[in-house]
């Protein structure tokens, strides 16, 4: 009896929904012209018991997905915290919106995640959405094909389709859109072997999964779990991905994306979506997660910004327009062994001591060149710096190091040059410079290199690159070494060289 009553009630509710849709269909379709509007209208289909909490961050994510739909972006990387509805928006609502409101029912999607369960979950949700009474009433032309309609793979009658595969099994499928939702798991991201395997699949297999290399799109949405995760690899290699980064708490600087988006927050610490993540909730997350996990998963920095040898807060108010007249300068070069993009870079950092005792970082240059190109850069930089800037170079042990030293010193004829073996490990060499930074004695001349420089030193020693830190340590060490300014020392150094 009760079963019959419930069935009758559901029937009446369905009829009422059809009547409401028939009455308001044009208004609903108009509101669904944007992806954000579509999510608001369709939310009740997938989440009838949950209230939709929206904010500018979700608008930003939706706007960038729309730019993919328009063909303005073909490679999109979004970093955002967990719990921001990223999977529903990117892997469920967006494909359904493209099939229906955007008029692209022919689109084919290959969706992936580290977890097979997550893949099946989102496949099922999209299929449930496009098979709903609400969706079929608004876009009756989009019907699923009875020939291929399963949890893992389904197609529509307009040649469109969706297939879900775990990231470890990406071979075989293809799509106009390859959607990668968290390629790493929190359990395996710290494993060098597991991480390397994920990176290998990303680099070697993903581009082959596209139907059209020029027009098909790859959309990656993920939280940061390690400096060398997929996101870090994309940035380190300079791959042409549009990068939308949404940390839980705002951190300057603000960077614009190609569609003109700029994080609207202006004060450090402003929350991303306070309507959903209150200050109290965020502070509790920090305690539960710990600084490393919170920094990666929520701040999109896989190493704590203030958890290493340098802290960004030490440089607040320490950016100056020009160095004081009379500043005494050293530039130290940290030389890379290879030009591979995944390897260390050659870096030259110019550090000086002002007449009032302040330490000034005056200029930073990095390059992934090698051989003759590096020699040309070092020479050109010396010419730009002028002959008052002393130059130091590391000398590798052995005969090869002596030959390189002689070659570089000869190339810099006319400049004051010193080449010495490095002593101690990288951290030990950086500690004296770190102490001066902490004491508030170190200033930076305002320039474009400021942010990349601070990003690297504040990740040290956990970041992928350490060349700017090594070059800073070298320049600072020579600057304060009394023997480095003794003419007799220079005569001896040249005689030995």
Image: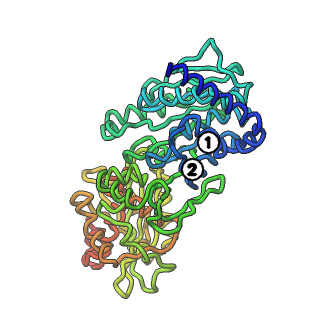
Q: Position of residue 74 (x, y in %)?
A: 63, 40
Mark 2, Cα crowd under 10 Å, few <14 / some 14-19 / many 20+, is some
**Separation (CA) of disc 2 from disc 1:** 10 Å
- Contact? badges 2 and 1 (CB < 8 Å): yes
Res 405 seen here: no
Look at mark 2 in the image and give the residue it sits on.
58
Residue at left offset 33%, top offset 56%: 284
Look at mark 1 in the image and give the residue it sits on.
39
Vertically, is 459 above or below 490? above
Q: Position of residue 217 (x, y in %)?
A: 61, 36
Quadrant occupied by the C terminus: bottom left
Q: Position of residue 201 (x, y in %)?
A: 45, 30
Answer with the quarter of the image where residue 347 lies: bottom left
Answer with the quarter of the image where residue 76 lies: top right
Which element is circle 1 on?
A: helix
Residue at left offset 41%, top offset 52%: 298
């Amino acid at each position: 009896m009760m079963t019959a009553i419930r069935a009758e009630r559901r029937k009446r509710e369905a009829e009422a929904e059809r009547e409401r849709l028939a009455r308001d269909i044009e208004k609903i379709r108009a509101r669904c012209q944007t992806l954000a509007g579509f999510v608001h209208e369709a939310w009740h289909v997938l989440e009838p018991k949950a209230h939709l909490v929206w904010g500018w961050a979700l608008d930003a994510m939706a706007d960038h997905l729309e730019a993919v739909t328009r063909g303005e972006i073909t490679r999109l990387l979004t970093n955002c915290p967990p719990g921001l509805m990223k999977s529903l928006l990117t892997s469920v609502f967006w494909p359904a919106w493209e099939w229906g409101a955007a008029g692209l029912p022919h689109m084919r999607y290959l969706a992936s995640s580290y977890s097979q369960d997550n893949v099946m979950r989102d496949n099922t949700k999209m299929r449930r959405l496009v098979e709903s009474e609400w969706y079929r009433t608004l876009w009756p032309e989009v019907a699923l094909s009875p020939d291929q309609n399963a949890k893992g793979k389904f197609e529509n009658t307009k040649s469109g389709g969706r297939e879900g595969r775990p990231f470890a099994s990406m071979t075989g499928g293809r799509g106009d859109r390859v959607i990668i939702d968290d390629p790493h798991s929190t359990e395996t991201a710290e494993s060098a072997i597991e991480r390397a395997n994920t990176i290998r699949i990303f680099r070697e297999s993903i581009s082959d999964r596209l139907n059209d290399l020029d027009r098909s799109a790859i959309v990656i949405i993920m939280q940061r779990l390690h400096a060398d995760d997929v996101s870090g690899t994309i940035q380190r290699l300079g791959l042409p991905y549009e990068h939308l980064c949404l940390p839980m708490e705002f951190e300057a600087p603000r960077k614009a994306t190609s569609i003109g988006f700029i994080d609207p927050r202006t004060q450090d610490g402003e929350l991303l979506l306070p309507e959903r993540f209150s200050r109290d909730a965020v502070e509790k997350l920090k305690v539960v997660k710990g600084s490393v996990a919170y920094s990666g998963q929520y701040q999109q920095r896989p190493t704590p910004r203030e958890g290493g040898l340098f802290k960004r807060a030490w440089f607040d108010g320490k950016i100056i327009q020009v160095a004081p007249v009379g500043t005494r300068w050293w530039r130290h070069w940290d030389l890379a062994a290879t030009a591979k993009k995944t390897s260390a870079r050659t870096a030259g950092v110019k550090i000086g001591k002002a007449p009032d005792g302040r330490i000034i970082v005056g200029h930073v240059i990095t390059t992934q060149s090698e051989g003759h190109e590096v020699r040309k850069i070092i020479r050109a930089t010396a010419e730009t710096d002028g002959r008052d800037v002393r130059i130091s170079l590391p000398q590798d042990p052995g005969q090869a190091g002596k030959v390189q030293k002689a070659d570089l010193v000869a190339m810099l004829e006319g400049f004051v040059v010193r080449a010495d073996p490095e002593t101690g490990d990288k951290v030990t060499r950086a500690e004296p410079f770190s102490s001066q930074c902490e004491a508030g004695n170190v200033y930076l001349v305002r320039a474009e290199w400021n942010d990349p420089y601070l990003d690297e030193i504040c990740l040290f020693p956990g970041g992928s690159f350490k060349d700017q830190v090594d070059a800073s340590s070298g320049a600072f060490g020579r600057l304060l070494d009394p023997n480095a300014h003794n003419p007799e020392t220079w005569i001896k150094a040249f005689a030995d060289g």
